Image (cartoon, rainbow, N blue to C red):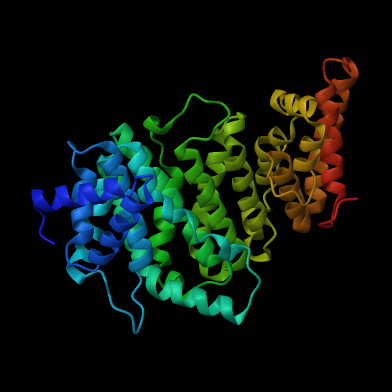
Amino acid sequence: MEINDANLQTLSAYLLKTLSPDVNERKPAEKFLESVEGNHGYPILLLHLIEKLDAEMTIRVSASITFKNYIKRNWRILEDFPNKISDADRQTIKTEIVGLMLRMPEQIQRQELKHLRAGFRYRHEFKSQELWTEIKMVLDNFAAPLTELFVGTMDLSKQYSNDASAIKIIYSSLTLISKLFYSLNFQDLPEYFEDNMKIWMPNFHTLLVTDNKLLHTTDTEEAGPLDKLKSQICDNIALYAQKYDEEFQPYLPNFVTAVWNLLTSTGQEVKYDLLVSNAIQFLASVAERAHYKNLFESQDTLTSICEKVIVPNMYFRDTDEELFEDNAEEYIRRDIEGSDVDTRRRAACDLVRSLCKFFEQPVTQIFSHYVSSMLQEYATDPVKHWKSKDVAVYLVTSIAAKSKTQK
């Protein structure tokens, strides 16, 4: 289909009719669009209409939804089925789609990103031959394009680092890509990602240590795009530290340093809770591995971890107190073992347990000092310093809980 005004007007008219409440008008329009979707140039025509500034927003959004569904149905090439997207159209889409997304209004951007949100279920599935077959098929068709998209989006993050609107969309895209990486790597380490670890891991490290003031938010409750991305990266590297530590070993020391710096520079605001808990869980995953003992065996290192990471994140904050007063059951549910909601306290407790696996005596000695100090502070004014006693009790129970089940 040639890109010209006549075809754009025709397509606009049919897209508008697909929004009609009259089934006699809507159905024929839908049938027409189905009949032409195999034509060369059809998806490119949709992209031009999405970008057409003088077109009505309803038509542009409709074109965006139509394009999303078209890609979802037809992008994968299946044996014995016709390929509805020509090689030339595929290449144009790959070249244009990210730049187009950055130029579009937010309601259109949401449509173009929405289809990426599906497909995270592999982390929850039971192992089966059917599952392995599906994952293999997805990896064969999607791993390389995902990696190319990741590299391309990383380049865009540098190119648009001073563009407030664009950089937020880019970081949201990077977060979705990172979530897909986690899901595709959860069941087992795919050969493709093992071979391309040299692409993914250095870029993950770059994102973990990069700051951009345009991505900072004033909201104390809701995490911003920068915090969400770093949180997901901590999830990804914790997965590799837990399950693929041999392959991940060359990259691990740099990540430990990056996560340590992140934890010691991140505030106590609620918006950082998931980031902090995921970062601490990464350290816990590393600390329980025998061949990483050397990273933690120094007395100064253990003291610093206890002082700067564990104790601060066990404190009962004002926001915790508010949640407890509003809904005590929800607070307790979050704080107990087995909840699917991570908290700073639970993560800090897991880190204590991991450190005690190899360093129980020095960790116990360090915490004994803190427990004594906090109980003394509580004794000076029980009403004012009751939170000090709360932390002391939590420290004691953290050290005492040696197994995964807390009674």
Residue pictured at 66% horizontal, 71% vertical: 126
Left or right of 153? Residue 8 is left
Left or right of 148? Residue 239 is right
Q: Position of residue 402 (x, y in %)?
A: 84, 55
Quadrant in which residue 290 is drawn: bottom right
Q: Position of residue 313 (x, y in %)?
A: 69, 35
Quadrant in which residue 103 is drawn: top left
Give the answer, above or below, for where 384 lies relative to 286: above
Give the answer, above or below, for where 377 lies relative to 137: above
Left or right of 122? Residue 168 is left
Quadrant in which residue 386 is drawn: top right
Q: Which residue lies most toward the bottom here?
A: 80
Q: Is residue 204 something that shows in the picture?
A: no
Q: Which residue lies most toward the front here?
A: 24
Give the answer, above or below, for where 327 lies relative to 398: above
Q: Nearer the viewer, residue 103 or 277?
A: 103
Residue pictured at 30% horizontal, 62% vertical: 31
Residue pictured at 64% horizontal, 65% vertical: 291
Left or right of 1? Residue 143 is right
Q: Position of residue 131 (x, y in %)?
A: 57, 75
Quarter holding the N terminus? Answer: bottom left
Q: Position of residue 375 (x, y in %)?
A: 87, 27
Q: Is residue 346 something that shows in the picture?
A: yes
Residue pictured at 64% horizontal, 75% vertical: 127
